[in-house]
Image (tube, coloured by chain):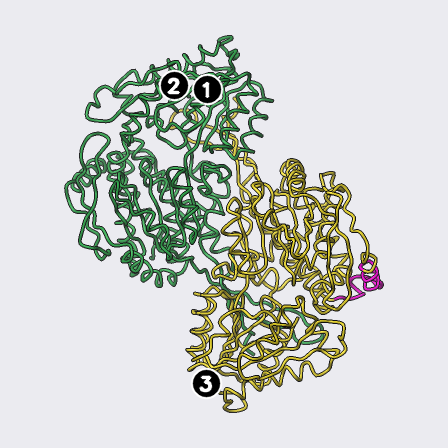
Chain colours: A yellow, B green
Amino acid sequence: MGFFDTHKPLLDRALRAIEERGYWEAYPEAPSRKIYGETAKEDGEAAFRARLGGRFALDGHPSNGKTAGKEVSPYGMALDIAYPTADINALVAASREAGKGWAQAGPETRVGICLEILHRLNRHSFEMANAVMHTTGQPFVMAFQAGGPHAQERGLEAVAYAWREMTRTPAHVTWTKPQGKHDPIVLEKEYRVIPRGLALVVGCATFPTWNSYPGLFASLATGNTVIVKPHPTAILPLALAVETARAVIADAGLDPNAVLLAVDEPGAEITKALATNEAVAIVDFTGSSAFGEWLRENARQAQVYTEEAGLNSIVVTGTDSFKAMCANIAFSLSLYSGQMCTAPQNVYVPRDGIGTDEGHKGFDEVADGIAGAVDKLLGDPARAAGICGALAAPATLERVGACAKLGTLARASAPIEGLDEARTATPLIVKLDGANAHDHEEERFGPISFVIAADDAHDCIRRASEGARRKGALTAAIYATDEALIDEAADAFAAAGVVLSCNLTGGIFVNQNAAFSDYHVTGANPAGNACLTDAAFVANRFRISAIRRPRAA
Amino acid sequence: MGFFDTHKPLLDRALRAIEERGYWEAYPEAPSRKIYGETAKEDGEAAFRARLGGRFALDGHPSNGKTAGKEVSPYGMALDIAYPTADINALVAASREAGKGWAQAGPETRVGICLEILHRLNRHSFEMANAVMHTTGQPFVMAFQAGGPHAQERGLEAVAYAWREMTRTPAHVTWTKPQGKHDPIVLEKEYRVIPRGLALVVGCATFPTWNSYPGLFASLATGNTVIVKPHPTAILPLALAVETARAVIADAGLDPNAVLLAVDEPGAEITKALATNEAVAIVDFTGSSAFGEWLRENARQAQVYTEEAGLNSIVVTGTDSFKAMCANIAFSLSLYSGQMCTAPQNVYVPRDGIGTDEGHKGFDEVADGIAGAVDKLLGDPARAAGICGALAAPATLERVGACAKLGTLARASAPIEGLDEARTATPLIVKLDGANAHDHEEERFGPISFVIAADDAHDCIRRASEGARRKGALTAAIYATDEALIDEAADAFAAAGVVLSCNLTGGIFVNQNAAFSDYHVTGANPAGNACLTDAAFVANRFRISAIRRPRAA
């Protein structure tokens, strides 16, 4: 049985999921021995350890004989992995050469291969978890989930969308036009999916797989060959993904150079040269707004899909469960040290305070409530490490220090005990008054948040949604007991193109985003022009060409 | 019954048609009194005549008190219609103001309005036929069909795609995530279609309605307001469409400024200023490659959808019905004097000739066969007028004269007898040898074609498909008795992103393109980046925004 037939039931379920958009788990998120095997955890760690200090081999991959790679774990250890490098012209030539067979393989073969790649990636989720953890600084469980099954689900989602769009048009049709008393005109028409060509996927430093799989799999499924350019500080996760993809493609009897790895080092990046190469027809990019803008300005020969930075806000206007609200916000601020692109930065609170189940709470009491909830959440150092992880970039640690001076501290940042080799910082919370402060109006990436005093609930909504419109945002949240305020916020944030979460308490958080149900980025504000995943994300990666001829007599 | 319910059966049928892609006539193409009414023809002409020499009124439309309009029929008569003009800032402000209600009206209301607009346009197809004929020079029957029902079908197709894409995502879903022994997490999620904002539709001189309706209706249905900027020589057809659209929108109780008309005059065009206005989020353009390129370079704030020029070819390698082949090609060269964007320009023939049912035919015999078929087709002046119509632009007539000197004449162009006031020219056919000629390698718009000698059948296919890849093409055709050559051409033209027609004889022609079945432009070569109509044409005109909240206890 071929890959497509093997995985057809999963594809069918995924197709239903993207229509229904209810809850569905395609790949188990629990890092459980019962699911992944009794020795899966140890095997995965051993496989990861075996990569360290060695040369990462990719058989048949273009190479200039040199290597690159200077990854250092945010937890302290140097990975010391040497990846093969290749000249850009050689990469492009190999990709184009593989492209002929990849285009001709057709949707079914390609989708089968994509599903098998995802299947094998899933089986190696523990190795991937270690790779993600030690390149991004994510805590282990997050690295497993976001780097493994959740990323795989985003990839599966893209494959499902690609399949759906490619198969909307029949492969053949007989077109019969009546001619009154005369014989009808009968044309046989054949429709073919034709890819754009060569796609570039540019990975990011914090979620190398989760943010790259959608573009990678959407381009592959639709017949484009892909060059994967990891962030120089987070190469290993994508190198593993490329290795797996190439193995599956080779097993299917096709040229594994349909997926290539382009490695570079900090300070000697090759992304610009790759992205502007005339052969590159598609670019998927996750990263800074500055580089996203550069790509849109310069990679003019390509379709450019971006996810960039944003200014995510929470509006607090009232709650009937003050403690649960503070605990929920505290977790959102703490998770992966605020390094998720969906993490909130700005918490807007009316200057005169809010009504709660504990009575009126003044502005300072709200800020203190959140700060206290963070203290409580992170009181146990082991738990703090498991929630916050480490900081991916040294600049983030410097930023935490600098931002502490921007206003009155509601909570000071501190290193996490017991992670002495790691680069860590618990959430910094700074109070500002929106009437005269502007420091919160740009993105301050990392465990940095602001509690901002505004005139009233309407002013909170207006400031938060205008920030989203101007600077972009991927998430927004509101706490309110007044339905009219929720409606007002719903309209304001929809107009700003931001997903809004209302009154979240308990085990669901504004920064969480579920494949098959939640759209990630709307594409309607400066936080990115692409949405993971909607029809627009896949429909323009291929075109339909037709051949028509009169029916043979 | 509201507009949506009234037209729901038509929408449902259109949704089926875009999936099946078989033959379907949504609006009758026959200019028949039985269908359109006993006096429809005279009523339509009278309505058109009543517009002449007058002021075109648009109640409630922004105006600066001035007028513009210098249309002259290619058949000789000055239309002398004065259209209201408005400053760009006033147009943008009015469009944005109307945009609030238009976005909030929702998919069902907007789609119902679009379907009613199309219905009313259909009822006035005879008036439109006169308007199209006397701005573009199309012969009457073509002006009726392409300007009326066929254009309406392209509009309906876009509405169907928009509806399908907008309704792919449910409006609400309950997301229930199991939590083992604990209660599940239950979120209520609401999804909203949010438009990009303001769309600009730039009409062309030859098919003002057929090429504009897809973008117009796709943008309108997805919640964007539209400013329609007609070509200064073909204003009336789009002014009529705007008038109808505004009437329907007003009848629905919404602000008619959701559709605006922006008129200018030759030499004082406002398209660049409009297209680069910061508020314009979408541009649909049909016209020259030079202006298409300008838009892509400069209208950077907008999604730009283009249909530009191309180099359409016919490859003649052999036939089992020589006369029918020549007659078919002759009609394609003659129809609307080669001014269709789908008209062939280059006919490639092996230098040593081809095999046919009449025995071997040398290169010159093939050229003479086509030329003779044109002579025969246009032998009767009245029939010639009904097929060729008039030339939209004086430059086209000059070009015919200039191109006659580029090689050996297979057929000389001549004016059409009896159309003495009109600007006319029958097909010019020039013979070239591909080994040393290059004059056919750029677009020569109008009744100008080349019969080009190539080394053999493979060389014909290679030259034609490479021309398409380099300069763009919207159509291609091959005549062959060898299936292997058809396969070779199918692969070559698919790779160049061009629709291929094989061995057309009888009543179907390479320049014809049927809504709901044939895609117009693939978007995969320089002839345009958009395809009429595929999912990519509509899916990026709106985004989905979501609101999620825990289920109330």
Kind of residue at disc 2: Leu
Which chain letter matches label 3? A
Residue B102 appears left or right of A441: left
Judging depth in this view, the residue of B524 and B223 nearest the camera is B524
Q: Which mark is residue B406?
A: 2
Ranked by sequence position, the earlier of labels 1 and 2 is 2
Where, by quadrant of the figure, is residue A456 drawn? Answer: bottom left
| C-alpha span from label 3 to label 1 | 78 Å
As displayed, is residue B511 above or below residue B460? below
Image quarter hosting the N terminus of chain A: top right
Pointer 2 local density, CA inside 10 Å: few below 14, some 14–19, many at least 20: some
Q: Position of residue B207 (x, y in %)?
A: 33, 37
Co-location on one chain, circles 3 and 1:
no
Mark 3 and mark 2 in contact (Cβ < 8 Å)?
A: no
Asked whether the residues under the numbered discs 1 and 2 touch, taking CB atoms below 8 Å apart as contact, a structural biologist would say: yes
Q: Main secondary structure of the magenta part?
A: helix
Numbered disc 1: secondary structure = loop
| CA neighbours of label 1 inside 10 A, class few (<14), some (14 to 19), many (20+) | some
Residue closer to the observer: A451 or A335: A451
Query: Which residue corresponds to mark 1?
Result: B437
Q: Decide: is B288 above or below A37.
A: above
Residue A213 picture quarter: bottom right
Q: Which residue type does callout 1 highlight?
A: Ala
Q: Secondary structure at mark 2?
A: loop
For this rendering, which residue is in front, A416 or A331?
A: A416
Mark 1 vs mark 2, CA separation in Å: 9 Å
Task: Name which residue type carries label 3.
Answer: Arg
Could you tell me which secondary element the residue under label 3 belongs to?
loop
Q: Which region shows up in magenta?
A: A31-48
Determine whether label 3 and label 1 are within 8 Å by CB.
no
- Residue that badge 3 annotates: A351
